[in-house]
């Protein structure tokens, strides 16, 4: 077992990892920028190190400084959380080269699955269905025209090294394609330092389904699936588990394919294999693998009773996977909503500020993961995620009722949040029926702008 862990992150995920480590008797070291000196993760960790100014590239993205801090404090391991350096193959390599354990997959696995083209190739080789599209990177518009012969319109142009919905364009005609291709290329280059693109057929009214896997480099299991179809600008806002749209047979096939892929790439740690599900055709297609813990991991923990972060730490400490597939069962239904410091009435503009009265909901089946406390000054330099509200109940219907009750109890004064959005969604007939898809929320927001401003 690991003895001393540095958490190379901030916010609620740093708090989450610190708590899991301390539950296992592992000493913790937080890192923080000048903007986060009073952050909750700094207060909760056993020790803390200032790693630089507020700008992420000079602090949370500074590999040399983070590793130096770990060595200085006598750490034997580093957990990257999500975001920042979590899917940086060079960071994984550098941690290992420094003689430390990286709580996650190897640099080789991150490189393979982080490039969307090589990930598609690996998935296809493992027998996992992939969305019809280019077999490799698309070298210019002319090559893209040939791919269109297979995909037709609409077509999605995506960054090969992408993530977070950036570097993506949808074209519905040849003229739109010729305009969108260089735009996607430029955005991908600016965001990821890699302008490589690939193309995929757009699946109409697709659902976003993802499978949680745990692996130790040799063996792998799944912890069933989550549905993340409610998205704004390709960013998830509401996640739940299990998905209500899958038959038992298709669920078994989907989850088995995720395990097969994890084994094929010698994956280690917690990872998520993401798919698009075509409701009309009752088929699923691989889209990517996230080689880290996900923001929405608590809904899987709620329905399975498995502490995913703790299992990551055990695996990184050299323990073989201790959970057998037959031990993983699903109980009830869980929903997570992401509470961001944003103003829904003003196109979700960021709204940093000082937390006033904070009232956290409680009661059976309610979990609140956050980095908030009364008087905390939310900095303007980072992602706007403040907290995640997770509810669990025997049925999906009961979970929505519980979510509404918990949101009613929640109070976060001093900043605007997305609470009103989730109250409205929880009351919407389509959401209650589970009749949504990945583009549904965009249309709903246009139709309900007045309700969010009320």
Image: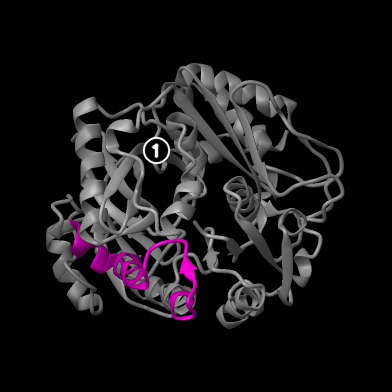
* Image quarter in which the C terminus is found: top right
SS under mark 1: strand
Q: Which x, y percent locates residue 56?
A: 64, 73
Range of residues picked out in magenta? 95-123
Observer able to see residue 280:
no
Q: Which x, y percent locates residue 82?
A: 52, 58
Q: Which x, y percent locates residue 51?
A: 70, 76
Q: Which residue is mark 1?
A: 226
Q: Is residue 154 left or right of residue 337?
A: left
- Out of 376 and 350, give the one closest to the viewer: 376
- Out of 347 and 41, give the one closest to the viewer: 41
- 383 magenta-colored: no
Q: Is residue 406 left or right of residue 210?
A: right
- The main secondary structure of the magenta stretch is helix
- Out of 331 and 289, give the one closest to the viewer: 331
Residue at figure coordinates x 42%, y 77% from the top left = 93
Q: Is residue 335 left or right of residue 19?
A: left
Q: Is residue 297 left or right of residue 23?
A: left
Looking at the picture, the colour scheme in use is one colour
Examine the rendered structure and indicate whether residue 34 appears above or below residue 208. Answer: below
Observer able to see residue 336:
yes
Q: Which x, y percent locates residue 196?
A: 32, 76
């Amino acid at each position: 077992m690991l003895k001393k862990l540095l958490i190379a992150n901030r916010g609620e995920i740093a708090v989450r990892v610190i708590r899991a480590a301390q539950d296992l008797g592992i000493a913790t070291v937080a890192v923080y920028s000048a903007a986060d000196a009073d952050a909750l993760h700094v207060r909760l960790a056993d020790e803390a190190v200032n790693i630089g100014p507020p700008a992420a590239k000079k602090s949370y993205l500074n590999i040399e400084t983070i590793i130096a801090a770990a060595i200085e404090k006598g750490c034997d391991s580093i957990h990257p959380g999500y975001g920042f350096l979590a899917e940086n193959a060079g960071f994984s390599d550098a941690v290992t080269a420094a003689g430390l354990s990286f709580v996650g997959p190897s640099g080789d696995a991150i490189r393979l699955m982080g490039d969307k083209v090589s990930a598609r190739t690996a998935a296809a080789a493992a027998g996992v269905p992939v969305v019809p599209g280019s077999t490799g990177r698309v070298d210019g518009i002319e090559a893209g025209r040939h791919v269109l012969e297979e995909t037709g319109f609409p077509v999605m142009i995506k960054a090969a090294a992408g993530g977070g919905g950036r570097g993506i364009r949808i074209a519905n005609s040849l003229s739109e394609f010729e305009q969108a291709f260089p735009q996607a290329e430029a955005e991908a280059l600016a965001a990821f330092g890699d302008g490589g693109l690939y193309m995929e057929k757009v699946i109409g009214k697709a659902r976003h389904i993802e499978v949680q896997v745990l692996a130790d480099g040799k063996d792998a299991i799944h912890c069933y699936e989550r549905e993340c179809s409610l998205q704004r600008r390709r960013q998830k806002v509401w996640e739940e588990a299990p998905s209500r749209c899958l038959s038992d047979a298709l669920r078994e096939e989907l989850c088995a394919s995720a395990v097969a892929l994890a084994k094929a790439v010698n994956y280690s740690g917690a990872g998520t294999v993401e798919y698009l599900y075509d409701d009309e055709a009752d088929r699923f297609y691989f889209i990517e693998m996230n080689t880290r813990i996900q923001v929405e991991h608590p809904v899987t923990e709620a329905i399975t009773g498995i502490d995913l972060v703790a299992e990551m730490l055990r695996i990184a400490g050299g323990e073989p996977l201790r959970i057998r597939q037959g031990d993983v069962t699903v109980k009830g239904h869980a929903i997570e909503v992401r509470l961001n410091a944003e103003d829904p009435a003003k196109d979700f503009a960021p709204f940093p500020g000082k937390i006033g009265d904070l009232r956290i909901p409680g009661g059976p089946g309610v979990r609140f993961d956050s980095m908030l406390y009364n008087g905390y000054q939310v900095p303007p330099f980072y992602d706007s995620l403040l907290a995640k509200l997770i509810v669990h109940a025997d049925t999906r219907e009961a979970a929505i009722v519980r979510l509404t009750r918990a949101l009613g109890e929640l109070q976060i004064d001093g900043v605007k949040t997305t609470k009103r959005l989730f109250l409205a969604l929880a009351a919407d007939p389509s959401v209650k029926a589970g009749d949504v898809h990945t583009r549904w929320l965009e249309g709903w927001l246009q139709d309900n702008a007045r309700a969010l401003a009320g």
